[in-house]
Amino acid sequence: MFKPDLTRADVTPEGVWLNRRKLIAAMGAGSVVGALGLPATAAADGELEPHTWEQITGYNNFYEFGTGKSDPAENAGAMETTPWTVKIDGLVENPGEFSLLDLVGDIPTEERIYRFRCVEAWSMVIPWNGFELNKLLAKVGVKPEAKFVAFETAVLPDVMPGVRSPILDWPYREGLRLDEAMHPLTIMATGLYDKPIPNQNGAPMRLVVPWKYGFKSIKSIVRISLVEEQPHATWNNMLPREYGFYSNVNPEVDHPRWSQASERVIGTGLFADRIDTLPFNGYADQVASLYDGMDLRENF
Ligand SMILES: Nc1nc2c(c(=O)[nH]1)N[C@H]1C(S)=C(S)[C@@H](COP(=O)(O)O)O[C@H]1N2
Ligand SMILES: [Mo]
């Protein structure tokens, strides 16, 4: 399952990463996307229109700062993110506590415009800046026995009103199977719209796994552990019948309390049409093969 030599080209054409604004600039007026010879998926993804800075940074889930959608924007500014220390432990060649700069400062970032689908059935399109998680994992040296990656968010009671009450079992924790973590679509985001990522979106570094429900994309990471067993994941452990460990976006498997067949696109207004939710949030061509042979109702 561990494929250290897996590259982006193994999974998806380079054109998929092109961002629409750059694409339009490169084409000049009057051209069509087809003229670049891009595959259909690239053209489709090139049409993703990102949400605005205000939408992306004003409507958030970050329970450490409160459960309301505007609480994170109001409260997260108090979190100090420089310096920031990340602990790397478990089945790695180079464990330790690293300053974020030492850990990832030399990894170049790129823009990734991804669909983002919350398990609560709303969605946005977000232009992240970041790098593939597999690049960080290559630096820390994954031992062959490792099968999962576990992540933890900071717990800062002085600035996080949420962690002073037991709404969740702090620290917020998440995990991925190693092949999911190594997949080229899985990124660590450190920026948004070519600016440093705002605290409410998970500064200074958060996970983004675009084919999974948003709660997998853990924010403000302070610990990354390579482990052999499926790790503790906050929502999965608290309500296992409602939130699976995999939590791949799947319009055919409803949440016990609501449908996952469609989603409300943020900003389109109360009465705007919902759009159909896509299997794996539209990334099935790239990631469905990770789950070959698995029953996705059972492993939801
Ligand atoms: N540490 C932490 N990470 C978290 C959350 C959280 O409450 N705490 N919420 C998750 C949920 S439910 C979603 S939908 C996304 C929201 O990311 P955004 O606010 O950048 O859109 O963050 C995820 N990561
Ligand atoms: Mo979410």
Image (spheres, grey):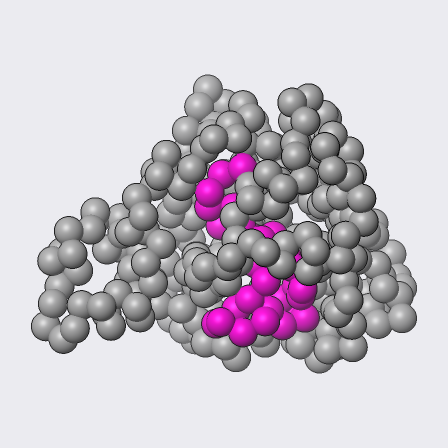
x then y, percent, for residue 180: 54, 36
- From the viewer's perspective, is residue 107 above or below residue 284? below
Q: How many marks?
A: 0
Q: Residue at x 82, y 68 (%)?
A: 160
- The residue segment tinted magenta is 182-210
Q: Quadrant of residue 267?
A: bottom left
Q: Residue at x 52, y 30 (%)?
A: 4
Position of residue 12 in the picture relative to residue 190 (left or right): left
- From the viewer's perspective, is residue 56 above or below residue 275? below
Quarter of the image that includes the C terminus: top right
Quarter of the image that includes the N terminus: top right
Would residue 192 be counted in the magenta stretch?
yes
Q: Is residue 55 visible?
A: no
Q: Residue at x 37, y 58 (%)?
A: 275
x then y, percent, for residue 215: 62, 52
Q: Is residue 82 visible?
A: yes
x then y, percent, for residue 187: 53, 50
Position of residue 212 in the picture relative to residue 152 (left or right): left
- From the viewer's perspective, is residue 224 above or below residue 130? above
Would residue 188 be counted in the magenta stretch?
yes
The foreground one among 255 and 111 is 111
The foreground one among 74 and 91 is 91
Q: Residue at x 76, y 43 (%)?
A: 88
x then y, percent, for residue 166: 87, 56
Position of residue 204 in the picture relative to residue 276 (left or right): right
The foreground one among 272 and 55 is 55
